[in-house]
């Protein structure tokens, strides 16, 4: 005769249920209010952070699946409630690790998250498309990835990543939506009807600071920031708020684009940041006969890398050359980045290779405590 399931068995099974937004087990988040077991019927009460949680059905389905796999369980009932103010405050304190006040975790000396600011000298080079594909590709390889759409005026990441629901709020903490395994925040999520943003520098800085300090990012391996073109307010604010962030410069092959991209890379002479490398986008269009139609010329990416290497006194590599493919544009419009779709086209292969190269770079020890106490 099978052993009857117990409430402890059920709670152990619920450890496998991960909150889709907070990315932690619901048991760790104190979301399991009560478990009742009676003659093969299990009733689970779950407390949501907000009554209108857009993923309540997903959580309920995951609870039924996890508990239903237990031997002896014939039926699973799930009741959804909502946390009260005290419970929400306790959860927020737990998520912040007991820290009081607003803190940018990526600026702390012991933080291990790689922060890449994806920059370009001018618009129209496909910087956002590259950023979205890199983020999705890294997440598809099992990394914990965050993405900040820092292009406040020209936000496009929510569309490109297929974000389906808005951020939720836990008192003064913002819980970012997750798409393709990537935590994402953008000003576009807070504006109705594709409204325009008309802000000056100080407000831009404050918005970026909120994205970094007030959003619950959790323990990330990589944070990507999609910067606006040029070397304006947001680029300077990123350098101030996250001094250890590193730049990835995106350009097209044409000389005009390359020359402007060089200026974006030279910004680090004033900010003290590091340039990781250069990505050449729209490198060529593959023709049916196997030849390459170099619509925008050739060599711009390598030229930027060479100029920055000489200017900054160290080797700046060309990380990759991404060809033009209609499917890359379609993936952005449809919210499914090409890099995570099935296939191994030249653009997919190149984007995945760039993502792998950035993902596996080790972070130096400069500025971080080693946990060693002098004798």
Image: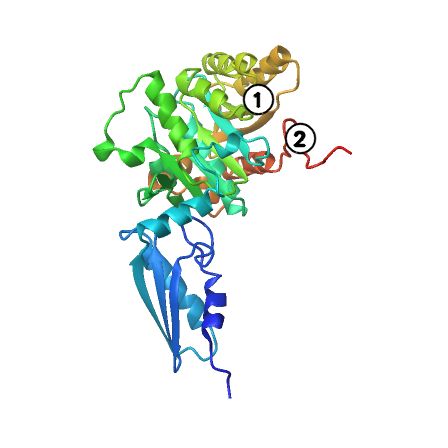
Image coordinates of residue 187 in percent, x first then y, are 32, 31
Question: Can residue 253 be seen in this snapshot?
Answer: yes
Image coordinates of residue 321 in percent, x first then y, are 54, 28
Image coordinates of residue 251 in percent, x first then y, are 48, 21
State which quadrant residue 177 falls in: top left
Residue closest to the far bottom:
1
Left or right, 315 with respect to 9, comes to right
Task: Quickly name the residue at label 1.
Answer: 275
Quadrant of the image containing the C terminus? top right
Q: Kindly report the distance in space between the C-alpha atoms of the residues bearing marks 1 and 2.
A: 17 Å
Q: Earlier in the sequence, mark 1 or mark 2?
A: 1
Task: Quickly name the residue at label 2.
Answer: 365
Which color mode does the image show? Answer: rainbow
Along the viewing direction, whichever of 102 and 308 lies nearer the viewer = 102
- Residue visible at 40% across and 37% down in the picture: 215
Left or right, 230 with respect to 351, comes to left
- Residue visible at 30% across and 59% down in the picture: 81
Left or right, 36 with respect to 312, comes to left
């Amino acid at each position: 005769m099978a052993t009857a399931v117990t409430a402890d068995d059920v709670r152990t099974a619920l450890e496998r249920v991960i909150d889709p937004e907070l990315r932690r087990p619901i048991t760790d988040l104190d979301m399991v209010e009560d478990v009742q077991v009676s003659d093969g019927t299990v009733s689970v009460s779950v407390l949501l952070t907000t009554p209108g949680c857009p993923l309540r059905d997903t959580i309920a389905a995951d609870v039924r699946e996890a508990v239903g796999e237990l031997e002896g369980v014939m039926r699973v009932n799930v009741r959804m409630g909502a946390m009260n103010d005290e419970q929400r405050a306790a959860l927020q304190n737990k998520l912040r690790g007991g820290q009081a006040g607003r803190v940018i975790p990526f600026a702390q000396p012991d933080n291990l998250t790689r922060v890449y600011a994806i920059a370009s000298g001018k618009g129209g080079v496909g910087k956002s498309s590259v950023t979205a594909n890199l983020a999705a590709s890294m997440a598809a390889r099992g990394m914990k990835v965050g993405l900040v759409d820092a292009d406040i005026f020209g936000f496009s990441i929510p569309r490109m990543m297929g974000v389906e629901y808005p951020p939720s709020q836990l008192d003064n903490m913002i819980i970012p939506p997750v798409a393709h395994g990537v935590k994402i925040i953008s000003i576009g999520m807070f504006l109705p009807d594709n409204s325009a943003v008309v802000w000056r520098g100080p407000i831009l800085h404050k918005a970026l600071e909120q994205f970094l300090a007030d959003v619950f990012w959790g323990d990330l391996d990589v944070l990507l920031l999609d910067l606006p073109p040029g070397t304006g307010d947001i680029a300077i604010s990123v350098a101030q708020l996250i001094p250890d962030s590193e730049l990835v410069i995106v350009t097209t092959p044409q000389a005009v684009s390359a020359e402007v991209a060089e200026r974006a890379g030279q910004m680090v002479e004033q900010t003290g940041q590091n340039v990781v490398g250069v990505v050449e986008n729209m490198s060529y269009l593959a023709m049916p006969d196997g030849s390459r139609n170099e619509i925008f010329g050739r060599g711009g990416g390598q030229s930027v890398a060479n100029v920055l290497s000489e200017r900054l006194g160290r080797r700046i590599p060309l990380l990759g050359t991404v060809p033009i493919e209609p499917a890359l544009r379609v993936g952005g419009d449809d919210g499914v980045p090409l890099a995570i779709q099935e296939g191994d086209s030249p653009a997919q292969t190149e984007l995945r290779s760039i993502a792998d190269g950035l993902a596996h770079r080790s972070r130096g020890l400069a500025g971080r405590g080693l946990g060693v106490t002098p004798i």
